[in-house]
Amino acid sequence: MILSAVILVLFIAYSILILYYWSAWKSVPEYKPAVTSPSVRISVIIPARNEEKNIAALLEVLGKQTYPANQFEVIVVDDHSTDSTAAIVQGFPFVKLIQLQEDDINSYKKKAIEKGIEKAAGQLIVTTDADCIPSPNWLSMIAALKEEKNAVFIAAPVVFSHNNSALQLLQSLDFLVLQGITAASVHNKVHSMCNGANLAYERNAFGKVNGFTGIDTIASGDDMLLMHKIAVKFPQQICYLKAKEAIVSTIPMKTWREFFNQRIRWASKAKNYDDKRIIAVLLLVYLFNFSFLTLFAAGFWCYNYWIYLAALWIGKTIIEWPFVSSVVAFFDKKPLMKYFFFFQPLHILYTVFSGLLGQFGRYEWKGRKVK
Protein backbone atom coordinates (compact mmCIF):
# COMPACT_ATOMS: atom_id res chain seq x y z
CA MET A 1 0.00 0.00 0.00
CA ILE A 2 2.80 2.43 0.89
CA LEU A 3 4.67 1.57 -2.31
CA SER A 4 1.56 2.19 -4.41
CA ALA A 5 0.93 5.52 -2.69
CA VAL A 6 4.51 6.70 -3.23
CA ILE A 7 4.40 5.75 -6.91
CA LEU A 8 1.05 7.50 -7.34
CA VAL A 9 2.55 10.69 -5.91
CA LEU A 10 5.51 10.36 -8.28
CA PHE A 11 3.17 9.84 -11.22
CA ILE A 12 1.13 12.94 -10.36
CA ALA A 13 4.27 15.06 -9.94
CA TYR A 14 5.71 13.71 -13.20
CA SER A 15 2.45 14.41 -15.02
CA ILE A 16 2.49 18.02 -13.83
CA LEU A 17 6.08 18.35 -15.07
CA ILE A 18 5.23 16.99 -18.53
CA LEU A 19 2.18 19.25 -18.81
CA TYR A 20 4.42 22.17 -17.87
CA TYR A 21 6.83 21.26 -20.67
CA TRP A 22 3.99 20.83 -23.15
CA SER A 23 2.51 24.21 -22.29
CA ALA A 24 5.91 25.91 -22.50
CA TRP A 25 6.76 24.23 -25.81
CA LYS A 26 3.50 25.42 -27.36
CA SER A 27 4.18 28.95 -26.14
CA VAL A 28 7.55 29.13 -27.91
CA PRO A 29 6.83 30.94 -31.20
CA GLU A 30 8.41 29.64 -34.37
CA TYR A 31 10.99 32.27 -35.23
CA LYS A 32 10.53 34.41 -38.32
CA PRO A 33 13.42 36.85 -38.81
CA ALA A 34 12.54 40.53 -38.59
CA VAL A 35 16.15 41.50 -39.25
CA THR A 36 16.76 40.89 -42.95
CA SER A 37 20.43 41.82 -43.15
CA PRO A 38 22.21 40.99 -39.89
CA SER A 39 25.81 42.11 -39.76
CA VAL A 40 27.26 40.43 -36.67
CA ARG A 41 30.67 38.89 -37.25
CA ILE A 42 30.57 35.12 -36.57
CA SER A 43 33.27 32.59 -35.75
CA VAL A 44 32.18 28.98 -36.23
CA ILE A 45 34.30 26.71 -34.03
CA ILE A 46 34.40 22.97 -34.69
CA PRO A 47 36.32 20.66 -32.33
CA ALA A 48 37.27 17.52 -34.27
CA ARG A 49 38.89 14.21 -33.37
CA ASN A 50 39.19 11.43 -35.95
CA GLU A 51 36.37 12.77 -38.11
CA GLU A 52 37.72 11.95 -41.58
CA LYS A 53 34.43 10.31 -42.57
CA ASN A 54 32.28 13.30 -41.63
CA ILE A 55 34.03 16.64 -41.62
CA ALA A 56 34.19 17.25 -45.38
CA ALA A 57 30.39 17.16 -45.67
CA LEU A 58 30.08 19.76 -42.90
CA LEU A 59 32.68 22.08 -44.41
CA GLU A 60 31.07 21.86 -47.84
CA VAL A 61 27.75 23.04 -46.36
CA LEU A 62 29.48 25.83 -44.44
CA GLY A 63 31.00 26.99 -47.70
CA LYS A 64 27.48 27.39 -49.12
CA GLN A 65 25.91 29.39 -46.29
CA THR A 66 23.63 32.25 -47.30
CA TYR A 67 25.27 34.43 -44.67
CA PRO A 68 27.85 36.73 -46.33
CA ALA A 69 31.22 34.98 -46.57
CA ASN A 70 33.04 38.09 -45.36
CA GLN A 71 30.95 38.09 -42.18
CA PHE A 72 31.97 34.71 -40.81
CA GLU A 73 34.98 32.46 -40.42
CA VAL A 74 35.32 28.73 -39.80
CA ILE A 75 37.86 27.39 -37.31
CA VAL A 76 38.52 23.67 -36.91
CA VAL A 77 40.46 22.64 -33.82
CA ASP A 78 42.01 19.23 -34.41
CA ASP A 79 42.06 17.28 -31.15
CA HIS A 80 45.01 14.91 -31.65
CA SER A 81 43.41 13.08 -34.59
CA THR A 82 45.23 9.96 -35.77
CA ASP A 83 43.44 9.82 -39.12
CA SER A 84 43.34 12.22 -42.08
CA THR A 85 41.03 14.80 -40.46
CA ALA A 86 43.64 17.58 -40.59
CA ALA A 87 44.57 16.85 -44.20
CA ILE A 88 40.92 17.02 -45.25
CA VAL A 89 40.43 20.34 -43.46
CA GLN A 90 43.48 21.77 -45.21
CA GLY A 91 41.72 21.13 -48.52
CA PHE A 92 39.22 23.90 -47.68
CA PRO A 93 40.98 27.26 -48.15
CA PHE A 94 38.38 29.24 -46.18
CA VAL A 95 38.89 27.14 -43.04
CA LYS A 96 41.44 27.96 -40.35
CA LEU A 97 43.02 24.83 -38.81
CA ILE A 98 44.38 24.79 -35.27
CA GLN A 99 46.19 21.80 -33.79
CA LEU A 100 45.46 21.21 -30.10
CA GLN A 101 48.76 20.77 -28.27
CA GLU A 102 47.56 20.19 -24.72
CA ASP A 103 47.51 16.59 -23.55
CA ASP A 104 46.77 14.62 -20.39
CA ILE A 105 43.71 16.71 -19.51
CA ASN A 106 40.18 15.57 -18.68
CA SER A 107 38.26 17.92 -20.98
CA TYR A 108 39.79 18.02 -24.43
CA LYS A 109 36.67 19.44 -26.06
CA LYS A 110 36.52 22.47 -23.76
CA LYS A 111 40.21 23.11 -24.36
CA ALA A 112 39.67 22.85 -28.13
CA ILE A 113 36.82 25.37 -28.02
CA GLU A 114 38.87 27.65 -25.79
CA LYS A 115 41.78 27.59 -28.24
CA GLY A 116 39.39 28.33 -31.09
CA ILE A 117 37.96 31.33 -29.26
CA GLU A 118 41.48 32.66 -28.62
CA LYS A 119 42.05 32.78 -32.39
CA ALA A 120 38.53 33.90 -33.30
CA ALA A 121 37.86 37.27 -34.90
CA GLY A 122 34.08 37.15 -34.55
CA GLN A 123 32.01 38.68 -31.79
CA LEU A 124 29.54 35.78 -31.91
CA ILE A 125 30.89 32.27 -31.31
CA VAL A 126 28.91 29.47 -32.94
CA THR A 127 29.79 25.87 -32.10
CA THR A 128 28.89 22.66 -33.84
CA ASP A 129 30.33 19.15 -34.11
CA ALA A 130 32.28 17.68 -37.01
CA ASP A 131 29.58 15.09 -37.72
CA CYS A 132 26.80 17.67 -38.10
CA ILE A 133 25.03 19.08 -41.15
CA PRO A 134 23.27 22.48 -40.86
CA SER A 135 20.93 24.08 -43.37
CA PRO A 136 22.23 26.76 -45.79
CA ASN A 137 20.39 29.45 -43.77
CA TRP A 138 21.76 28.28 -40.43
CA LEU A 139 24.08 31.20 -39.69
CA SER A 140 21.62 33.75 -41.09
CA MET A 141 18.94 32.58 -38.66
CA ILE A 142 21.31 32.65 -35.69
CA ALA A 143 22.60 36.12 -36.58
CA ALA A 144 19.09 37.51 -37.06
CA LEU A 145 17.90 36.27 -33.66
CA LYS A 146 21.04 37.55 -31.97
CA GLU A 147 20.56 41.07 -33.32
CA GLU A 148 16.78 41.16 -32.95
CA LYS A 149 16.67 39.89 -29.35
CA ASN A 150 20.09 41.16 -28.24
CA ALA A 151 20.74 37.56 -27.26
CA VAL A 152 23.92 36.72 -25.40
CA PHE A 153 23.42 32.94 -25.57
CA ILE A 154 21.36 31.00 -28.13
CA ALA A 155 20.37 27.35 -27.86
CA ALA A 156 19.23 25.95 -31.20
CA PRO A 157 17.62 22.70 -32.42
CA VAL A 158 19.42 19.46 -33.19
CA VAL A 159 17.99 16.30 -34.73
CA PHE A 160 19.38 12.84 -35.36
CA SER A 161 19.48 11.43 -38.86
CA HIS A 162 18.52 7.76 -38.63
CA ASN A 163 17.87 4.48 -40.39
CA ASN A 164 15.21 1.97 -39.36
CA SER A 165 17.23 0.07 -36.75
CA ALA A 166 15.71 -0.11 -33.27
CA LEU A 167 18.72 1.65 -31.76
CA GLN A 168 18.64 4.62 -34.12
CA LEU A 169 14.86 4.98 -33.96
CA LEU A 170 15.04 4.98 -30.16
CA GLN A 171 17.79 7.60 -30.16
CA SER A 172 15.95 9.81 -32.63
CA LEU A 173 12.71 9.78 -30.68
CA ASP A 174 14.42 10.19 -27.33
CA PHE A 175 16.55 13.06 -28.61
CA LEU A 176 13.52 14.89 -29.97
CA VAL A 177 11.97 14.77 -26.50
CA LEU A 178 15.13 16.35 -25.12
CA GLN A 179 14.89 19.06 -27.77
CA GLY A 180 11.35 19.84 -26.69
CA ILE A 181 12.44 20.06 -23.06
CA THR A 182 15.34 22.30 -24.08
CA ALA A 183 13.06 24.74 -25.88
CA ALA A 184 10.52 24.74 -23.05
CA SER A 185 13.05 25.27 -20.28
CA VAL A 186 15.03 27.99 -22.07
CA HIS A 187 11.83 29.82 -23.03
CA ASN A 188 10.70 29.78 -19.38
CA LYS A 189 14.11 31.02 -18.21
CA VAL A 190 14.99 27.81 -16.40
CA HIS A 191 18.04 27.31 -18.66
CA SER A 192 18.43 23.63 -17.88
CA MET A 193 19.47 22.19 -21.25
CA CYS A 194 21.19 22.89 -24.56
CA ASN A 195 23.41 21.02 -27.01
CA GLY A 196 26.88 21.98 -28.20
CA ALA A 197 26.09 20.75 -31.71
CA ASN A 198 24.07 23.95 -32.26
CA LEU A 199 24.99 26.75 -29.93
CA ALA A 200 25.91 30.42 -30.10
CA TYR A 201 27.18 32.91 -27.53
CA GLU A 202 28.87 36.27 -27.43
CA ARG A 203 32.62 36.13 -27.20
CA ASN A 204 32.53 38.96 -24.65
CA ALA A 205 30.07 37.04 -22.49
CA PHE A 206 32.37 34.01 -22.57
CA GLY A 207 35.13 36.25 -21.26
CA LYS A 208 32.97 37.93 -18.62
CA VAL A 209 32.16 34.57 -17.00
CA ASN A 210 35.82 33.51 -17.28
CA GLY A 211 35.04 30.93 -19.93
CA PHE A 212 35.32 27.35 -18.77
CA THR A 213 37.17 28.25 -15.57
CA GLY A 214 35.68 26.22 -12.74
CA ILE A 215 34.27 23.56 -15.06
CA ASP A 216 37.41 22.87 -17.08
CA THR A 217 38.26 19.66 -15.20
CA ILE A 218 34.89 18.12 -16.08
CA ALA A 219 35.06 16.02 -19.25
CA SER A 220 31.60 16.99 -20.47
CA GLY A 221 29.54 20.16 -20.12
CA ASP A 222 31.00 22.49 -22.74
CA ASP A 223 27.39 23.38 -23.51
CA MET A 224 25.09 23.13 -20.48
CA LEU A 225 27.56 24.04 -17.76
CA LEU A 226 28.67 27.07 -19.77
CA MET A 227 25.05 28.07 -20.28
CA HIS A 228 24.48 27.91 -16.54
CA LYS A 229 27.45 30.22 -15.93
CA ILE A 230 26.26 32.72 -18.53
CA ALA A 231 22.66 32.53 -17.22
CA VAL A 232 23.79 33.79 -13.82
CA LYS A 233 25.18 36.98 -15.37
CA PHE A 234 22.74 37.40 -18.28
CA PRO A 235 19.50 35.66 -17.18
CA GLN A 236 17.21 37.57 -19.55
CA GLN A 237 19.40 37.31 -22.65
CA ILE A 238 19.32 33.58 -23.26
CA CYS A 239 17.10 32.48 -26.14
CA TYR A 240 15.97 29.35 -27.92
CA LEU A 241 15.91 29.50 -31.72
CA LYS A 242 12.80 27.58 -32.73
CA ALA A 243 13.16 27.57 -36.49
CA LYS A 244 13.31 24.70 -38.97
CA GLU A 245 15.99 26.49 -40.99
CA ALA A 246 18.18 26.52 -37.88
CA ILE A 247 18.02 22.75 -37.31
CA VAL A 248 21.33 20.92 -37.33
CA SER A 249 21.34 17.22 -38.19
CA THR A 250 23.82 14.92 -36.49
CA ILE A 251 24.67 11.23 -36.52
CA PRO A 252 23.32 8.91 -33.80
CA MET A 253 25.45 6.34 -32.03
CA LYS A 254 26.04 3.21 -34.10
CA THR A 255 26.18 0.63 -31.30
CA TRP A 256 24.44 0.10 -27.98
CA ARG A 257 27.81 0.47 -26.25
CA GLU A 258 28.34 3.89 -27.83
CA PHE A 259 24.78 4.88 -26.97
CA PHE A 260 25.15 4.04 -23.28
CA ASN A 261 28.54 5.74 -23.15
CA GLN A 262 26.97 8.90 -24.56
CA ARG A 263 24.08 8.85 -22.09
CA ILE A 264 26.41 8.17 -19.17
CA ARG A 265 28.50 11.13 -20.30
CA TRP A 266 25.43 13.34 -20.43
CA ALA A 267 24.29 12.16 -17.00
CA SER A 268 27.74 12.79 -15.51
CA LYS A 269 27.17 16.57 -15.72
CA ALA A 270 24.28 16.50 -13.26
CA LYS A 271 26.37 16.59 -10.09
CA ASN A 272 27.90 19.87 -11.25
CA TYR A 273 24.61 21.77 -11.61
CA ASP A 274 24.29 24.68 -9.20
CA ASP A 275 20.61 25.37 -9.95
CA LYS A 276 18.66 23.29 -7.43
CA ARG A 277 15.54 23.41 -9.62
CA ILE A 278 17.33 21.32 -12.22
CA ILE A 279 18.47 18.83 -9.58
CA ALA A 280 14.89 18.52 -8.29
CA VAL A 281 13.55 17.82 -11.79
CA LEU A 282 16.24 15.25 -12.52
CA LEU A 283 15.58 13.53 -9.21
CA LEU A 284 11.84 13.38 -9.89
CA VAL A 285 12.37 11.92 -13.37
CA TYR A 286 14.87 9.39 -12.04
CA LEU A 287 12.68 8.23 -9.17
CA PHE A 288 9.64 7.97 -11.42
CA ASN A 289 11.52 5.78 -13.89
CA PHE A 290 13.02 3.75 -11.05
CA SER A 291 9.50 3.05 -9.79
CA PHE A 292 8.91 0.89 -12.87
CA LEU A 293 11.76 -1.40 -11.86
CA THR A 294 10.47 -1.43 -8.30
CA LEU A 295 7.02 -2.56 -9.43
CA PHE A 296 8.54 -5.20 -11.69
CA ALA A 297 10.55 -6.65 -8.80
CA ALA A 298 7.58 -6.43 -6.40
CA GLY A 299 5.50 -8.43 -8.86
CA PHE A 300 7.45 -11.58 -7.97
CA TRP A 301 5.92 -11.34 -4.49
CA CYS A 302 2.49 -10.12 -5.52
CA TYR A 303 1.18 -10.34 -9.09
CA ASN A 304 -1.00 -7.27 -8.57
CA TYR A 305 2.09 -5.11 -8.83
CA TRP A 306 2.52 -6.21 -12.44
CA ILE A 307 -0.99 -4.92 -13.12
CA TYR A 308 0.05 -1.61 -11.57
CA LEU A 309 3.18 -1.70 -13.73
CA ALA A 310 1.14 -2.08 -16.92
CA ALA A 311 -1.19 0.71 -15.82
CA LEU A 312 1.76 2.99 -15.09
CA TRP A 313 3.28 2.22 -18.49
CA ILE A 314 0.03 3.17 -20.21
CA GLY A 315 -0.38 6.23 -18.01
CA LYS A 316 3.13 7.44 -18.77
CA THR A 317 2.50 7.06 -22.49
CA ILE A 318 -0.81 8.92 -22.34
CA ILE A 319 0.53 11.86 -20.36
CA GLU A 320 3.61 12.22 -22.58
CA TRP A 321 1.87 11.73 -25.92
CA PRO A 322 0.59 15.30 -26.57
CA PHE A 323 3.94 16.89 -25.73
CA VAL A 324 6.06 14.40 -27.66
CA SER A 325 3.79 14.34 -30.71
CA SER A 326 3.86 18.15 -30.88
CA VAL A 327 7.66 18.22 -30.79
CA VAL A 328 7.97 15.40 -33.31
CA ALA A 329 5.60 17.23 -35.67
CA PHE A 330 7.75 20.37 -35.60
CA PHE A 331 10.79 18.34 -36.65
CA ASP A 332 8.80 16.57 -39.39
CA LYS A 333 9.32 13.17 -37.75
CA LYS A 334 5.71 12.09 -37.17
CA PRO A 335 6.29 8.44 -38.26
CA LEU A 336 8.42 7.96 -35.13
CA MET A 337 5.34 8.17 -32.91
CA LYS A 338 4.25 4.65 -33.88
CA TYR A 339 7.23 3.35 -31.88
CA PHE A 340 6.67 5.54 -28.84
CA PHE A 341 4.67 3.11 -26.69
CA PHE A 342 6.98 0.16 -27.40
CA PHE A 343 10.19 2.07 -26.68
CA GLN A 344 9.06 3.03 -23.18
CA PRO A 345 10.75 0.04 -21.44
CA LEU A 346 14.08 0.73 -23.17
CA HIS A 347 13.85 4.41 -22.27
CA ILE A 348 13.13 3.58 -18.63
CA LEU A 349 16.03 1.13 -18.39
CA TYR A 350 18.62 3.42 -19.94
CA THR A 351 17.44 6.37 -17.82
CA VAL A 352 17.89 4.41 -14.60
CA PHE A 353 21.23 2.80 -15.38
CA SER A 354 22.90 5.69 -17.21
CA GLY A 355 21.74 8.06 -14.50
CA LEU A 356 23.40 5.88 -11.87
CA LEU A 357 26.61 5.18 -13.77
CA GLY A 358 26.94 8.82 -14.75
CA GLN A 359 27.43 9.73 -11.10
CA PHE A 360 29.86 6.99 -10.15
CA GLY A 361 31.34 5.40 -13.25
CA ARG A 362 33.81 6.10 -16.01
CA TYR A 363 32.95 6.23 -19.67
CA GLU A 364 34.66 6.22 -23.04
CA TRP A 365 34.58 9.30 -25.25
CA LYS A 366 36.38 9.71 -28.56
CA GLY A 367 38.58 6.71 -27.77
CA ARG A 368 39.55 8.01 -24.32
CA LYS A 369 38.60 6.79 -20.86
CA VAL A 370 37.40 9.75 -18.81
CA LYS A 371 35.62 10.31 -15.53
Image (cartoon, rainbow, N blue to C red):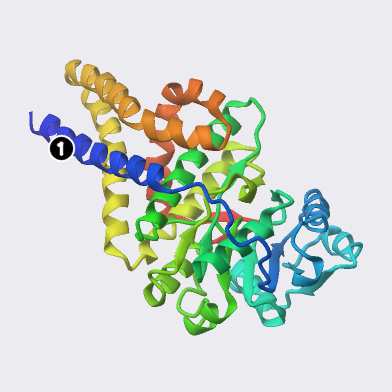
For the point 74% across and 51% down, which residue is it?
Answer: 136
Q: At label 1, which amino acid type do we have?
A: Val
**In the picture, which quadrant includes the N terminus?**
top left
Q: Nearer the viewer, residue 326 or 256?
A: 326
Q: Position of residue 180 (x, y in %)?
A: 45, 44
Q: Visible in this render: residue 106?
A: no
Q: Visible in this render: residue 88?
A: yes
Q: Is residue 67 above or below residue 303?
A: below
For the point 80% across and 57% down, which residue is it?
Answer: 59
Q: Is residue 371 above or below residue 32?
A: below
For the point 83% across and 58% down, which residue is it?
Answer: 63
Tell me the residue that label 1 is attached to.
9
Q: Position of residue 271 (x, y in %)?
A: 36, 62
Image quarter of residue 88: bottom right
Q: How many marks?
A: 1
Secondary structure at numbered mark 1: helix
Residue that sits furthest to the left in the current view: 1
Mark 1 closeness class: few <14, some 14–19, many ≥20 residues within 10 Å: few
Q: Position of residue 8 (x, y in %)?
A: 16, 32
Q: Nearer the viewer, residue 290 or 203?
A: 203
For the point 38% across and 66% down, which residue is it?
Answer: 272
